[in-house]
């Protein structure tokens, strides 16, 4: 990743990417109800890559760079070029951002750097075969063979601020990146333990817990189902999202093991949601690649009758079962957003503490699978973006902002939901052949 702009400690090799020119919006798209504070030409348009705000800086991904813009004006402050490969991401922790770049068409390592967002200065940078980012640390794994199997990897915890190794020696295996949270670019919270894979045989792995402060691997060992694994307090949770079909609606097996003793604490079958076409979603997160939808230790699941319920992973007990049938899309500590079907349908917001309905709105008209909705549950607003059918052959993207308390529609924008916060929304759209990013605050 090449550094462009910023203060001392930048990467070598200054790039030549042309800065994005801010363009004050004089008009908005036909569907929009409010003018953008500013817009920039050069955005990715129909790409739903997530934009984020850190203080007075807007971070926005591009096809070959991550760009930092001034929140008030849209003026470019700094940017970092990347390879444009299949995996380019960033995670935010307080005033810092970790930029991760996987070289395009390459089996080489990930390149990453930790940057102060306000100044654009690089604190440190490195490369590794596997990179997992938490709010206080970056876990790097080096794997001698290109297939990245856990039994061939050694992992080290590095302090986020200076990159210094926490333990005296790396440990064999690698860290799970499953998470319980809503949709954002924020780094996962690092807990006292993380789920960790270790070799069981030359061709097999098992899951365990890794103590983050010491690098100690706990006695627990759980079978690898190739789905999601996560640490909750001192327990290891593993899922089998492709459990035997026909038992219940869309069965997902959850197993919990005590880390220090290795004994099984509980085993329970829950359900994922169903798409409108009747197919199982096979996921407790908004997409099969995501871990879970929920907050803290509580995750949203579906009962055999199709109702959304909240399950506490600490003890496997149901906190509440809602009257609402459907699939959870997003959550924070206050609310859970439920969709009638996993891929489309009416929307309902329920209270996270009780499961009681706060409001429901009719199906906004988003088309279903394989299209995906993008959501944000933050501050006083609920934001949902997706594609809507207009005529027989047109499915333009639309973003809708609802009042969190009442469900009243506040704004509607013609374009992709590229990011949202408590008091802002970023919209990606196309203007002719150009991609445009609009910032609404």
Image: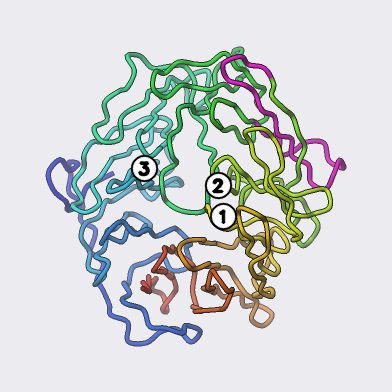
Name the residue located 22 percent from the left edge and 68 percent from the top edge.
75
Q: Is residue 251 magenta?
A: yes
- Report the magenta residues as a range: 238-263
Q: Residue at x 64, y 81 (%)?
A: 390
In this picture, is 35 found above or below 236? below
**Camera-side residue of 189 and 412:** 189
Query: Dot 2, how many residues are within 10 Å of its Cα: few (below 14), some (14-19), or many (20+)?
Result: many
Please tell me which residue lies in front, 289 or 34: 34
Image quadrant of residue 204?
top right
Q: Nearer the viewer, residue 4 or 158?
A: 158
Distance in Å between CA atoms under marks 1 and 3: 26 Å
Q: Disc 2 or disc 3, which is closer to the eye?
A: 2
Residue bearing mark 2: 295
Residue 38 highlighted magenta (yes or no): no
**Residue 113 horizontal side relative to residue 429, left or right:** left
- The residue beneath circle 3 is 100
Q: Earlier in the sequence, mark 2 or mark 3?
A: 3
Which residue is the extreme one toward the left? Answer: 8
* Quadrant including the C terminus: bottom left
Picture coordinates of residue 82, whole percent (x, y): 32, 48
Task: Please name whichever residue, 156 or 89, is drawn nearer the observer in this view of the structure.
Answer: 156
Residue at the farthest right position: 246
Element type at mark 1: strand
Q: Are marks 1 and 2 in contact (CB under 8 Å)?
A: yes
Q: Secondary structure at mark 3?
A: strand
Label 1 vs 3, first from the N-terminus: 3
Distance between the alpha carbons at the discs numbered 1 and 2: 7 Å
Q: Residues within 10 Å of mark 3 (few under 14, many from 20)?
A: many
Left or right of 5: which side holds 115? right
């Amino acid at each position: 990743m090449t550094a462009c702009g910023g203060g001392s400690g930048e990467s070598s090799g200054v790039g030549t990417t042309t800065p994005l020119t801010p363009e004050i919006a004089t008009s908005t798209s036909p569907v929009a109800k409010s003018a953008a504070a500013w817009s920039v030409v050069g955005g990715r348009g129909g790409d739903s890559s997530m934009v984020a705000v850190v203080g007075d800086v807007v971070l926005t991904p591009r096809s070959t760079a991550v760009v930092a813009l001034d929140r008030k004006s849209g003026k470019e402050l700094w940017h970092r070029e990347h390879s444009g490969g299949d995996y380019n991401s960033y995670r935010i922790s307080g005033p810092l951002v970790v930029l991760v770049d996987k070289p395009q068409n390459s089996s080489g390592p990930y390149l990453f750097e930790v940057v102060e967002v306000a100044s654009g200065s690089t604190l440190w940078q490195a490369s590794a075969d596997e990179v997992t980012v938490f709010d206080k640390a970056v876990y790097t794994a080096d794997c001698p063979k290109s297939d990245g199997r856990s039994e061939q990897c050694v992992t080290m915890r590095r302090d986020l601020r200076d990159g210094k190794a926490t333990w005296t020696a790396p440990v064999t295996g690698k860290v799970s990146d499953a998470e319980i949270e809503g949709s954002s670019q924020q780094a996962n919270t690092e807990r006292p333990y993380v789920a960790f894979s270790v070799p069981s045989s030359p061709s097999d792995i098992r899951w365990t817990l890794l103590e983050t402060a010491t690098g100690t691997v706990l006695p627990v060992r759980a079978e690898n189902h190739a789905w999601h694994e996560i640490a909750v307090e001192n327990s290891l949770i593993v899922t089998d999202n492709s459990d035997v079909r026909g038992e219940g609606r869309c069965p997902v097996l959850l197993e919990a093991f005590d880390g220090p003793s290795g004994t099984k604490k509980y085993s329970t079958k829950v359900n994922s949601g169903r798409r409108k076409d009747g197919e199982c979603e096979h996921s407790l997160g908004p997409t099969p690649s995501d871990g879970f939808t929920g907050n803290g230790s509580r995750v949203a699941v579906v009962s055999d009758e199709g109702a959304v319920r909240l399950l506490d992973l600490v003890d496997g007990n149901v906190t509440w079962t809602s009257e609402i049938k459907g699939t959870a899309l997003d959550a924070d500590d206050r609310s859970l957003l439920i969709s009638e079907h996993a891929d489309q349908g009416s929307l309902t917001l329920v209270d996270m503490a009780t499961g009681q309905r706060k409001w429901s709105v009719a199906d906004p008209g988003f088309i279903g699978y394989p299209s995906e909705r993008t959501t944000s549950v933050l501050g006083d607003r609920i934001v949902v973006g997706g594609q809507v059918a207009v005529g027989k052959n047109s499915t333009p993207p639309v973003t809708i902002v609802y009042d969190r308390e009442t469900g009243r529609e506040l704004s509607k924008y013609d374009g992709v939901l590229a990011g949202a916060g408590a008091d802002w929304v970023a919209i990606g759209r196309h203007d002719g052949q150009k991609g445009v990013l609009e910032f609404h605050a």
